[in-house]
Image: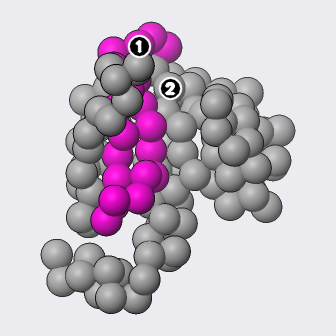
Amino acid sequence: MTPQEVRAYCLERGGAGEDTPFPSAPGLTVFRVRGKIFAFCALEERPLKVSLKCDPEEAGPLRATYPAIEPGWHLNKRHWNTVTVGGLPAALVRDLIDDSYDLVVAKLPRAERLLLDRA
């Protein structure tokens, strides 16, 4: 996947938005749903990497299976993976983005989840 494809796919998730909130890391794009982060990506860096939330039960097996999936860099390594996009099939990267988004949405208050259903 290209950086543009990663960005577009993240923004296609219901209610998703992006910003660059860290002055010390101006190239770091953050993708959020209802204010909660589901992905971090430095879209200009190569190799392209995206950090995504992951179910802790699945993180270990994913890391053991795919060398391109590592513990989240500067993040809670139990809940976040950093994925080297070019080292994985695009379908798997999309699935990992979906999983991250779904984990964040599941933790939102019911009223906020309902707003996403209407969008």
- In the picture, residue 67 is in which quadrant? top right
Q: Residue at x 50, y 76 (%)?
A: 106
Is 24 above or below relative to 53? above
- Residue pictured at 64% horizontal, 31% vertical: 74
Where, by quadrant of the figure, is residue 2 drawn?
A: top left
Residue farthest along the left direction in this orientation: 119
**Residue at 41% over, 59% down:** 36
Residue at 52% from the left image edge and 60% from the top image edge: 99
Q: Which mark is residue 45?
A: 1
Q: Position of residue 3 (x, y in %)?
A: 32, 26
**Location of residue 28 with respect to 110 vertically, above or below:** above
Range of magenta residues: 27-47
Foreground: 98 or 78? 78
- Identity, as a three-letter code, of the amino acid under mark 2: Lys
Question: On the rendered structure, is 65 left or right of 4?
Answer: right
Looking at the rendered image, the quarter that the C terminus falls into is bottom left
**Badge 1 local density, few (<14 within 10 Å), some, or many (20+)?**
few
Query: Helix, strand, or loop for circle 2?
Result: strand
